[in-house]
Image (cartoon, grey):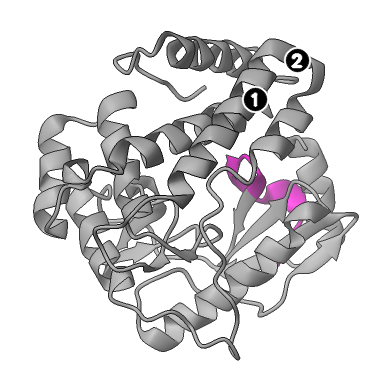
């Protein structure tokens, strides 16, 4: 799905106050995210994401009822338009400053204090960190080397087994699933969580390993990471299972990039660089967006 296809779906959905061509594209990944007027609309890559879209809307309602600062849905159910799930959200006020690690840490403390939703409401699934690997490699097709795809599948299987055997340090429960400052919006009323589609019930350590990996792979300054651990109250690197969840997330991050390789030469180059760093066991290689 490229921007043109996403705009066609957006126009067919008819949920915006004006023409789809005038909507501003905010992001293009597994979802194309558009803003217009007081609304934000997410167009999913394909129908496989419909169940996830339904769950994200359920999660938004649950968080609202629990008083957790998070993005709010404008419509309670997703649409399926030409094979693409479409969800509609209230647009947040403009940010007053960039989100910082401490903002994320404080929101995670709130989320990690929540009980798991009752089964008669909706079900939070486990954090299937590696669940998208096969799909992303399939979307990559012939754009990536078969040996690289086979290598990531082997890593996936190994880390999935190792993760299943972990003993957590923190009590398991609700997690955001992709806990990064980019998924926090700081408006006039303070920080709020966005991008709720990976919310899960699993090891709380999943949320903390994300920032540890950001420090090691994506250039997060050590001082910023230290601020995060100070405000959260614990450093996940002290946990013996940290390297397992880190390895699983690295595997998933590589495969996620692969899906963009057929149409984006920069994504292909970044994918190949990431895979090479994993093969070499070099944890110092910096990873970049594309």
Specify whether residue 241 is painted magenta.
Answer: no
Q: What element does badge 1 sit on?
A: helix
Give the mark nearest the N terminus, 1 or 2.
Answer: 2
Q: Which mark is residue 214?
A: none
Tell me, yes or no, if residue 87 can be seen here: no
Q: Position of residue 59 (x, y in %)?
A: 53, 74
Task: Verify CB contact (< 8 Å) between mark 1 and mark 2.
Answer: yes
Q: Eyeballing the image, is 18 above or below 244?
A: below
- Inspect this view and state whether residue 165 appears: yes
Residue 42, quarter of picture: bottom right
**Residue, x 35% and y 17% (percent of image)?**
286
244 vs 77, left or right, is left
- Give the residue at mark 2: 143
Q: Quadrant of the N terminus?
A: top right
Q: Nearer the viewer, residue 38 or 184?
A: 184
Residue 28 found in image quarter: top right
Q: Position of residue 11 (x, y in %)?
A: 82, 55
Q: Nearer the viewer, residue 49 or 166?
A: 166
Residue picked out by circle 1: 258
At horizontal 32% and vertical 18% (from top left) the residue drawn is 283
- Please state the extent of the stretch shown in magenta in the rendering: 16-32
Towards the viewer: 194 or 255: 255
Secondary structure under the numbered disc 2 in the rendered image: helix
Residue 131's spot in the image, x, y percent? Answer: 63, 46
Q: Is residue 35 above or below residue 149?
A: below
For disc 1, the neighbor class at 10 Å (few under 14, some 14 to 19, many from 20) is many
Residue positioned most to the bottom? 120
Q: Is residue 247 above or below residue 174?
A: above
Q: Residue furthest front?
A: 165
Q: Residue at x 27, y 65 (%)?
A: 107
Residue 194 at x, y percent in the picture: 45, 60
């Amino acid at each position: 799905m490229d921007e043109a296809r996403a705009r066609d779906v957006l126009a067919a959905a008819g949920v915006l106050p004006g023409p789809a061509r005038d909507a501003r594209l905010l992001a293009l990944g597994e979802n194309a995210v558009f803003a217009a007027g007081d609304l934000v609309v997410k167009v999913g890559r394909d129908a496989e994401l419909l169940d996830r879209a339904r769950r994200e809307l359920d999660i938004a309602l649950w968080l609202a009822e629990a008083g957790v600062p998070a993005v709010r849905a404008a419509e309670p159910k997703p649409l399926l338009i030409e094979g693409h799930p479409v969800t509609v959200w209230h647009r947040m006020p403009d940010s007053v400053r960039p989100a910082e690690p401490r903002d994320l840490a404080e929101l995670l403390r709130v989320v990690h204090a929540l009980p798991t939703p009752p089964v008669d409401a909706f079900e939070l699934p486990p954090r299937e960190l590696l669940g998208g690997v096969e799909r992303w490699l399939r979307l990559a097709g012939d754009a990536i080397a078969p040996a690289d795809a086979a290598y990531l599948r082997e890593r996936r299987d190994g880390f999935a087994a190792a993760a299943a055997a972990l003993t957590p340090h923190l009590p398991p429960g609700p997690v955001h699933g992709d806990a990064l400052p980019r998924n926090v919006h700081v408006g006039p009323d303070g920080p709020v969580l966005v991008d709720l589609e990976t919310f899960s019930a699993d090891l709380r350590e999943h949320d903390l390993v994300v920032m540890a990996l950001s420090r090691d792979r994506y250039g997060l300054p050590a001082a910023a990471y230290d601020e995060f651990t100070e405000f959260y109250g614990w450093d996940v690197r002290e946990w013996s299972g940290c390297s397992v969840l880190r390895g699983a997330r690295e595997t998933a991050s590589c495969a996620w990039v692969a899906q963009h390789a057929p149409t984006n030469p920069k994504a292909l180059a970044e994918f190949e660089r990431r895979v090479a760093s994993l093969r070499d066991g070099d944890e110092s290689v910096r990873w970049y967006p594309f």
